[in-house]
Image (cartoon, grey):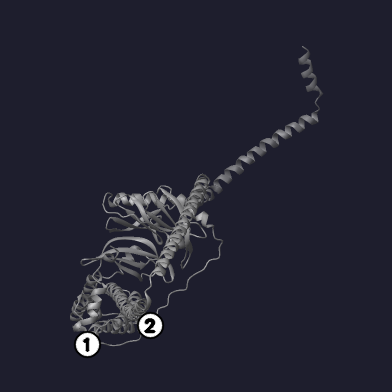
């Protein structure tokens, strides 16, 4: 009841003006709604074509934008892939560099470790054996004093006995009187003695002169045999060379050897006609060398005719060398004496054979002689170790050789080094002679002079023995590149190898006795003079390209990358093992220019 009253009161309170205003507002609202409906209808009718155009443009724009987005995505993927490849390449490069640095660090660490171990072993051995060495020295000095004392006593006793005998003889002479007969005998004896002395001195002078002449002829003959061997090797190499630079180098050496051979022939006691015939071939060799060198200097190449000439000279000289080599083992003073008297001896027969072999080449042409000077010796300024230190180091190096005591007996001065000469004897009396670098204490070379007469160890076992010895001395990463059987000895040549590349300047020679299975010879001078931390070898010529530059007649059997020594320093080279007919050669080509560096006939290494 109360709520109904409130509503009625509210209605009644409203004024007429307010009602009018409310009605007007309602009308305006209805009119506005109608107008809005009409406006919307008109707008829809008018804007429909425009909206269709906008939709077409939008679809075209969306299509164009889609293609651009796809192209952009593809471009982004290509860039990302390129960046990824570049990153991977840089990563691999860094990994290789890190790996190389790691290898280098490992090598340095290993070297330092070996050095420390060697030093520790040396110090230990020095401490253990110093007292023993001193004891041995004291015993030896005591023995020397005892021998000197006994010798002095013996000498005094002999002197007293001699004086007593002289006194007795004097007394007997006084009892007997020889008179004038004694004086005559004495005078005749003096005259006879003087005459004998004159004859003896004359005979001795004549013998000395004759011996001197024979010794000179003998030395000249040996020298001639060696020179003809060098001529043979040069002709052998130049006939298979295809490089003008290498040909020029070999022909120059060949010319020098030919001139030396001429001088040696002049010194031998050969008559004029024989000398003329023997020197004819040598003169021909020298003349051909000069002619071919002139062609090479003018930029020309050796043609087929030149190659045929070199082949002919090689065949003739080879027969000459064979005759001289056969005579090398027969040279003696008696044979030379007989040849000097009447020319009828083994030497005469050999010279006759050589003369017959070279008669077809009797076209002498003289040329200039050239001087060859050896490079000067080098000197190093460094503090020398004590001789006792060298002796102790030998005791370390040869701890398994049963050497009782080492003694320093002198010093050797070489071209690149000075060394202490140290020697010792084993319990069987065999001498071991070693050279120890006087500045570094390194073992340069040694010889163990015990005879070997049986082949109890084969080449493979001998090689392992040599490798074990090198490892004991601290020489790692060494590979054997050459072996020569010398009777019951095996001579190995080892060189340093790193990442498949062999470094020929870093060379060590090891001799193994195949009877006892021990190292009896060693030479590390070249290794110690050239070895250093090696870097990666960079070359600009491929192996296939270098192989194509070889002489056409060579058949390649093996090849690898190497570093070799030349007159201009170390050079990277490709090493080719080749066959030419029945001969085997090793040819070295510069790995950057392709030029021949050296040619070696393997028969000269056996």
Residue at the spot x=42%, y=67% of the render?
A: 170
Is 366 left, or right, of 61 in this rendering? left
In the shown orientation, is residue 412 left or right of residue 583? right
Q: Nearer the viewer, residue 396 or 300?
A: 396
- Residue in the foreground of this view, choosing between 495 and 150: 150
Q: Earlier in the sequence, mark 2 or mark 1?
A: 1
What SS does tag 2 mark? Answer: loop
Q: Does residue 365 show up?
A: yes
Q: Which mark is residue 273?
A: 1
Q: Indicate the secondary structure of the residue bearing disc 1.
A: helix
Which mark is nearer the camera, 2 or 1?
A: 1
Residue 411 position within the rendered picture, expressed as x and y whole percent measured from the top left: 48, 63
Numbered tag placed on residue 370 in the rendering: 2
Residue 475 at x, y percent in the picture: 43, 53
Residue at 29%, 54% in the rendered image: 452
User: In this rendering, is residue 483 above or below 300?
Assistant: above
Q: Nearer the viewer, residue 203 or 428?
A: 203
For the C terminus, the quadrant is bottom left
CA separation in Å, label 2 and label 1: 27 Å
Position of residue 101 measured from the top left corner of the image (x, y, whole percent):
50, 52
Q: Is residue 584 above or below residue 307?
A: above
């Amino acid at each position: 009841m109360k709520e109904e009253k409130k509503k009625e009161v509210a209605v009644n309170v409203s004024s007429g003006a307010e009602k009018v205003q409310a009605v007007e507002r309602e009308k305006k609202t209805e009119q506005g709604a109608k107008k809005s409906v009409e406006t919307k209808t008109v707008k829809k009718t008018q804007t429909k074509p425009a909206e269709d155009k906008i939709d077409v443009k939008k679809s075209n724009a969306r299509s164009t934008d889609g293609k651009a987005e796809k192209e952009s995505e593809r471009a982004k993927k290509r860039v990302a892939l390129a960046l990824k490849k570049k990153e991977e390449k840089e990563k691999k490069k860094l990994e290789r560099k890190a790996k190389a640095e790691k290898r280098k660090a490992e090598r340095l660490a290993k070297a330092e470790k070996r050095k420390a171990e060697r030093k520790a072993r040396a110090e230990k051995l020095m401490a253990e054996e110093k007292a023993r060495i001193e004891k041995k020295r004291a015993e030896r000095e005591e023995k020397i004093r005892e021998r000197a004392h006994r010798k002095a006593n013996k000498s005094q006793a002999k002197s007293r006995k001699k004086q007593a005998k002289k006194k007795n003889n004097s007394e007997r002479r006084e009892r007997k009187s020889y008179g004038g007969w004694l004086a005559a005998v004495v005078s005749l004896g003096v005259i006879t003695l003087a005459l004998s002395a004159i004859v003896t001195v004359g005979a001795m002078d004549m013998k000395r002169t004759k011996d001197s002449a024979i010794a000179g002829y003998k030395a000249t003959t040996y020298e001639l045999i060696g020179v003809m061997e060098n001529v043979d090797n040069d002709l052998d190499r130049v006939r298979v060379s295809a490089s003008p630079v290498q040909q020029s180098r070999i022909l120059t050496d060949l010319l020098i050897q030919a001139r030396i051979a001429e001088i040696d022939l002049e010194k031998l006691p050969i008559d004029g006609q024989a000398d003329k015939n023997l020197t004819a071939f040598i003169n021909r060799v020298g003349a051909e060398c000069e002619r071919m060198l002139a062609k090479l200097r003018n930029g020309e190449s050796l043609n087929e005719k030149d190659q045929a000439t070199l082949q002919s000279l090689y065949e003739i000289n080879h027969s000459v060398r064979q005759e001289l080599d056969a005579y090398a083992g027969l040279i003696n003073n008696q044979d030379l004496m007989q040849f000097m008297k009447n020319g009828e001896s083994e030497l005469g027969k050999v010279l006759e054979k050589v003369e017959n072999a070279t008669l077809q080449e009797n076209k002498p042409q003289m040329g200039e002689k050239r001087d060859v000077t050896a490079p000067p010796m080098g000197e190093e300024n460094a503090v020398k170790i004590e001789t006792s230190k060298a002796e102790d180091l030998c005791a370390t190096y040869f701890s398994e050789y049963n050497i009782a005591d080492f003694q320093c007996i002198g010093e050797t001065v070489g071209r690149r080094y000075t060394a202490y000469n140290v020697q010792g004897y084993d319990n069987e009396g065999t001498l071991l002679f070693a050279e120890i670098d006087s500045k570094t204490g390194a073992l340069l070379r040694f010889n163990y002079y015990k005879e070997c007469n049986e082949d109890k160890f084969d080449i493979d076992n001998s090689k392992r023995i040599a490798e074990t010895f090198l490892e004991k001395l601290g020489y790692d990463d060494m590979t054997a590149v050459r072996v020569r059987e010398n009777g019951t000895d095996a001579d190995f040549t080892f060189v340093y190898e790193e990442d498949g590349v062999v470094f020929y300047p870093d060379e060590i020679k090891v001799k193994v006795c195949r009877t006892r299975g021990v190292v009896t010879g060693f030479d590390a001078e070249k290794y110690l003079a050239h070895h250093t931390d090696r870097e990666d070898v960079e070359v600009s010529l491929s192996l296939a390209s270098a192989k194509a530059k070889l002489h056409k007649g060579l058949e390649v059997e093996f090849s690898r990358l190497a570093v070799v020594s030349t007159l201009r320093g170390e050079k990277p080279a490709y090493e080719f093992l080749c066959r030419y007919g029945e001969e085997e050669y090793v040819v070295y080509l510069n790995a950057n220019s392709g030029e021949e560096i050296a040619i070696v006939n393997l028969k000269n290494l056996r």
